[in-house]
Image (tube, rainbow, N blue to C red):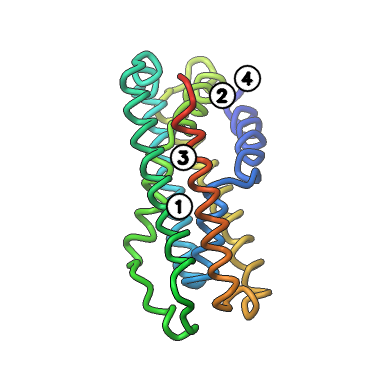
Amino acid sequence: MTVPSAFLAFGVVAALMTLIPGVDTALILRSAITRGRGEAMLAALGICTGVFVWGVAAAAGASAILAASNLAYQVLTYAGAAYLVFLGGQMIYRSLQKKRSPAARIPMPQSSYRTYLTGLVTNVLNPKIGVFYIAAIPQFTPAGTNALLMGMGLSAVHVALTLVWAVALVYGVRIAGRWLGSAKSVSWMDRITGTVLIGFGLKVALSRP
């Protein structure tokens, strides 16, 4: 396998992973609806940072150590699960509170920094991303190439695909912005996103190395 063919093959796999609806998609959509285009892209940047961190860690051998240590895997698993369940529960609780007017919703108790951090932590504490890179990096690293540089390159491909998908999601949401920006739709989006996060958190907690 040559370097160009490795990038191409990995791009196909990464694209399929990116297109599958999951926590990342839910976070981007929810941010676009409740906070606007800029906040959604900050969430996407946080997600991309988490993806890149896992890719570099896998290439450097950290993920191999994680895979060999059942205790390390379980600690990361339960930390990530607890965070996702907490975040989802917080969203559902907020959606069940007294209805607010659109103007009252604007100053949400979440800074731009926290929007970015939410996307970052969600991915960094998701061992499934690590497992993906543990399997992918060796398979798409041609013999004789620098594993660390190759891992960074493959991660960059994944990041680029994620950003393209995020832009598509954000602009797709904007088409129906008036309806999606209503107080009722925001509440339902919080409930749906919260449920997805809790479900994913429980799935992570019940996963096995």
Mark 2 vs 3: CB contact within 8 A:
no
Mark-to-mark CA distance, 1 and 3: 9 Å
Q: Label 3, on which residue?
A: 201
Q: Measured from the top left, where is residue 34 in percent x and y?
A: 50, 71
Q: What secondary structure is marked by label 1?
A: helix
Mark-to-mark CA distance, 2 and 1: 35 Å
- Picture residue at 43% right of the left edge, 53% below the top: 89
Mark 4 vs 2: CB contact within 8 A:
yes
For the residue marked with disc 4, what is the amino acid?
Met
Mark 3 burial class by Cα count in 10 Å: few <14, some 14-19, many 20+:
many
- Picture residue at 64% right of the left edge, 28% below the top: 5
Q: Quadrant of residue 70?
A: top left
Q: Quadrant of residue 209?
A: top left
Mark 1 vs 3: CB contact within 8 A:
yes
Q: Label 2, on which residue?
A: 140
Which comes sooner in the sequence, label 1 or label 4? Answer: 4
Q: Which is nearer the eye, 61 or 114?
A: 114
Q: What secondary structure is marked by label 3?
A: helix
Q: Which is nearer the eye, 173 or 189?
A: 189
Mark 2 burial class by Cα count in 10 Å: few <14, some 14-19, many 20+:
many
